[in-house]
Amino acid sequence: MRSTLLILFVGLGVGALAQDPMRSGVAYSKSIKGVEGDGQLVANATTDLNGMPVLFMMEGKGYKAVRLGADLRPAEEIPLDLQTFDGAVWDAASSIVVDDKLHILFVSNGKKTADYGIGRLNTEGALAIQDFHRVASFDHPNTFDPSTTTCRKTLPDLILFDSGAFYDQGDRIVASPDGKHFLVNHYTSGGKAKKKFWFACLDRSFQKEWSGSIELPFEDANSDIHQIVLDNSGKIILLTYVFCGDLARQADKLCHETHLTVLKDQGTRLKDLLLDKDFVSSARVMPKDDGRILVAIRYGALTGIPGVVVSIDTAMAKLKNTPVVDQRVPGIRKTKLATFGLPDDGSGKKPSGSRAAKVPDEIIELTPAWGGTLLLEGFRDQDLEVVMGDAIAMRTLHGAVRATWLDATDSIRWQRTVDRAFMTTSGESYGSVAFALLPEGLLLAYNDTPGGIAAINNSYTGASGKKKEKVPVEKSRLKLAWIPAQGGTPKEEAVGTPEGDFTLCPMTMVRSRAGDKLWIKGYDRGSQHQFVQVDPRVLERE
């Protein structure tokens, strides 16, 4: 462990390690008219040549680029909406980082069409968009509607608890695993006909290679695309949930189907697979170099079905119309995922029966790592009861995080769990886990409640529970964890507590190019915002 961390933090002096691991920047005020909650959402970021963060941030209904100063307040910013390029007016829709450079995807909407263009955000001098050019045109507008659209995906990507979002704008441009191709895309939602999907494949220079559109085999109003993947060969993979009933059935274990749709031959050929008819709570898809597709599935606490990683050869001719997870054929390999993270109920006994099976574990991410595959999962229980005066408050408990490494044959080689217990009313993203996958291991950043479950149960001591009373801000602290690539024992450290009523949002984490700094945004649930700077070298301290 020590030698691994020394490699990660090589060249760093003892004096640097003696500093406080978390430094709070100067808080600043920003409120957006008509927007409740955090009106500044960090959707993507890079760093400039001076090592300072440059953020792609949504403010209200439009994006802007923001550079932080030495005091960690916005020092420079430019709007990315209503920009004029190539004789048209453009609004930023998404972004992607390539070789530490932030590229902005713009959209110019007509009444029934949308043109797309890409420009590079220059950070070497004053912030500016350079090298803009058009890349695609779709017969469907892309307008930002805050009731159905989010600027970033919160992981785990929950099927029934996504606040009704049809679109995560971060999915509008995705990269192939080898970084040589990019897919610009959009699709319909809420219509009466079949769902339609538009796409354009770009090369590494963001020049269009091919494009098209296709009708998907789902009713538009009853289907929800949750993941869009482009593999190295040019196949497009869609993970879609198809709801089979009205809203009253959303708690039914047969309320939806999970589909895997593969588009081949530049999107001209479609193959749709029914993954499962049982209730799937969260899932992530990953293409493999040999053409197979891995799908990690969790069923939450509703069914008691264990999680599973399924390896599928979609080119098989013998695949049946029955759910893939139920088929027993050589081209489908399944690896069962055991439950984890159930908090101690105080009885001193291990859980058994249905309580042991119905554990709300969720899929965070599935990604290539260290010659195999890394699966990240998290415990998330939305039915936590906390006493507030004479009332009972329903809260979400964000629990343990587990890392699982599967080898090239998709067999589990090691699993490591980092325990935590965190409860907040700040929002789902504040319970998220940020991670950086590095050659030497996995770096995690996450919130934790000091004192654990006992402290959570006493969070509202003294509160009456009356509607007009302001709910106390739950206590939190930021923690880091390091898991070596070989699966060694995790190293965990608490790095600091945010000031006042601030709560940090881990998924906003930005990592410096040298790896010696992390920046994370906090919000006080009013009009105050604050960034903190974290030194991950705290993990090397003894």
Image: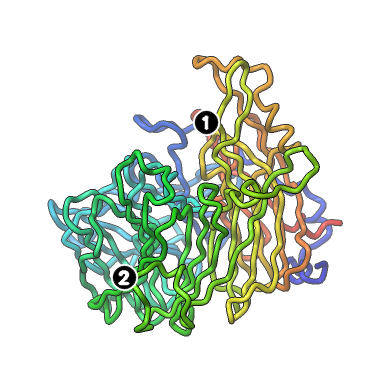
> Which SS class for mark 2?
strand
Q: Nearer the viewer, residue 303 or 389?
A: 303
Q: Earlier in the sequence, mark 1 or mark 2?
A: 2
- The numbered mark at residue 525 is 1
- The numbered mark at residue 92 is none
Pointer 1 and pointer 2: residues touching (CB < 8 Å)? no
Coordinates of residue 243 in the picture (x, y in percent)? 32, 51
Coordinates of residue 164 in the picture (x, y in percent)? 36, 43
- The numbered mark at residue 272 is 2
Coordinates of residue 262 in the picture (x, y in percent)? 33, 73
Mark 2 is surrounded, within 10 Å at the Cα level, by few (under 14), some (14 to 19) or many (20 or more) other residues, namely some
For the question of whether residue 296 can be seen, the reply is yes
Q: Nearer the viewer, residue 286 or 390?
A: 390
Q: Is residue 338 above or below residue 391?
A: below
- Classify residue 181 as left or right of residue 515: left
Which color scheme did the rendering employ for the protein? rainbow
Find the residue positioned furthest to the right: 542
- Residue at image position (62%, 37%) is 423
Question: For residue 207, which quarter of the picture?
Answer: bottom left
Q: In which quarter of the image is the C terminus?
A: bottom right
Q: Quadrant of the N terminus?
A: bottom right
Q: In this view, does 531 lie above or below 220?
A: above
Mark 1 is surrounded, within 10 Å at the Cα level, by few (under 14), some (14 to 19) or many (20 or more) other residues, namely some
